[in-house]
Image (tube, rainbow, N blue to C red):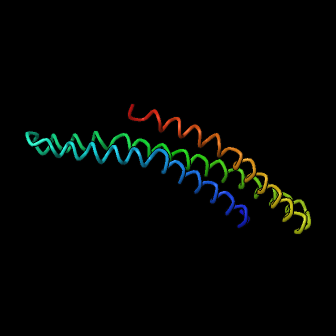
Amino acid sequence: MAELQQLRVQEAVDSMVKSLERENIRKMQGLMFRCSAACCEESQASMQQVHQCIERCHAPLAQAQALVTSELEKFQDRLARCTMYCNDKAKDSIDAGSKELHVKRQLETCVTKCVDDHMNLIPTMTRKMKESLSSIGK
C-alpha cells in the first residue's frame, strides 16, 4: 500500500483507539482495579477465593480488550483483501501487456479507493465498538 495511504489509515485507527481507550477502556480499568482491591480487603477469604474474585473483576476488561482487538483485526483483514485485489488487478494488467506507468497509476487509484472506503467505515466501527463496550459488565 502506498506509504501516504498507509499513514492515513494508521492515523485514523490510532485516533479511534485512543478515543476508545480514553472514553471506555480507562473507566473499565479503574473499575477493575477498585474491584480487585476490594477482593484483597476480604480478610476471611481464602487465597483461592481472592484469586477468583480478582479474575471476576478482570473479566469485563479482558472482554473489552478482546472485542477491540477482534474488530481491528477484521478491519485490517478487509483492507488487506481490498489491496490484494488491487495488486491482482495490476498483475493481470501487466500480464495483458499494459504499460507499467499506466498499471502503476491504476494500482495507486485502486489502493486510494480502498483506503477511502475503509476510512469511511471507521466512524461506524467506532460507534459500534463504543456501544458494545458500554454494554460489557452491565
Q: Quadrant of residue 47?
A: top left
In the rendered image, residue 103, in percent from the top left (x then y), is placed at: 86, 63
In the rendered image, residue 21, in percent from the top left (x then y), is placed at: 48, 50
On screen, residue 71 versus residue 124, left or right, reads left
Q: Quadrant of residue 50?
A: top left
Q: Is residue 69 visible?
A: no
In the rendered image, residue 63, in percent from the top left (x then y), is placed at: 41, 41
In the rendered view, would you say 3 is above or below 79? below
Q: Which residue is nearer to you in this view: 80 or 19? A: 19
Q: Which residue is nearer to you in this view: 2 or 95? A: 2
In the rendered image, residue 64, in percent from the top left (x then y), is placed at: 44, 43
| Residue furthest top as drawn | 138
On screen, residue 63 versus residue 15, left or right, reads left
Quarter of the image with the C terminus in it: top left
Give the residue drawn at x 47%, y 39%.
133
On screen, residue 102 versus residue 5, left or right, reads right
Give the residue drawn at x 84%, y 65%.
104
In the rendered view, would you say 7 is above or below 51? below
**So how many labels did they put on this image?**
0
Q: Which residue is nearer to you in this view: 99 or 125? A: 125
| Residue furthest left as drawn | 44
Q: Is residue 77 visible?
A: yes
Give the residue drawn at x 70%, y 50%.
119
Quarter of the image with the N terminus in it: bottom right
Give the residue drawn at x 89%, y 59%.
96
